[in-house]
Image (spheres, rainbow, N blue to C red):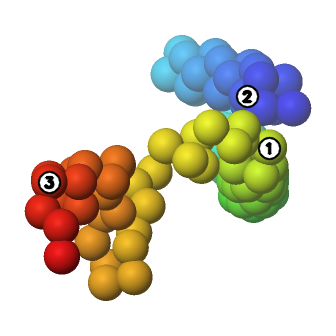
Amino acid sequence: SLWGGLSHLRKRVAVLAQNVEQVRNGGAVEGHLRAVARGIERELDVFKVQQRQEFEALAKDDADLQEEALLTLGRRFEGWLADAPPALADSRPHRGSRGRAAPASPLADGAGEGSSA
């Protein structure tokens, strides 16, 4: 896990810091200190690789989930449109044969204004 691995590395660095103090005081061997430092560097490299792989896997999963969510929401929206009440469909303006809005009543287009042929 991220936090477990990070905690382990922090402990190793703390041990390295203690060893540095011992070298300053003349108590530890410098070669041992280098070996500990190289070991920590290797562990850090492994940790970085593992975390990068985990991040990439999570990023791929995130992209897949987003795509799936969009498809699901699109299907839901299409379902809502299919289930829309007819009143919503009738509220759109109707077009006549010439592409203009059809008159709402026979009087609106001048047919009942008292002129007879």
Asked if the residue at tag 3 contacts the one at tag 1, i.e. Cβ–Cβ closer than 8 Å, the answer is no
Q: Position of residue 19 (x, y in %)?
A: 65, 23
Kindly identify the residue that appears in the image at 49 percent across and 43 percent down. 91
Question: Is disc 2 placed on a helix, strand or loop?
Answer: helix
Residue 71 in sight: yes
- Residue at the farthest bottom position: 98
Q: Mark 1: few, some, or many residues within 10 Å (few <14, many ≥20)?
A: few
* Cα distance in 3D space between marks 1 and 3: 45 Å
Residue beneath the point at 12% across and 62% down: 115
Closer to viewer: mark 2 or mark 3: 3
Q: Which mark is residue 114?
A: 3
Residue 68, x across and y down, in percent = 80, 56
**Residue 46 % position (x, y):** 78, 54
Residue density around tag 3, few if under 14, some if 14–19, many if 20 or more, within 10 Å? few
Q: Is residue 28 visible?
A: no
- The residue sitting at 40% across, 55% down in the picture is 93
Give the structural element (helix, strand or loop) at label 3. Answer: loop
Q: Which mark is residue 39?
A: none
Q: Amino acid at mark 3?
A: Gly
Residue at label 2?
6
Q: Quadrant of residue 13?
A: top right
Q: Amino acid at mark 2?
A: Leu
The amino acid beneath tag 1 is Asp
Q: Position of residue 76 (x, y in %)?
A: 78, 46
Residue closer to the observer: 65 or 78: 78
Q: Label 1, on which residue?
A: 83
Q: Which of the two labelled residues, at mark 1 and mark 3, occupies the earlier sequence position?
A: 1
SS assignment at label 1: loop
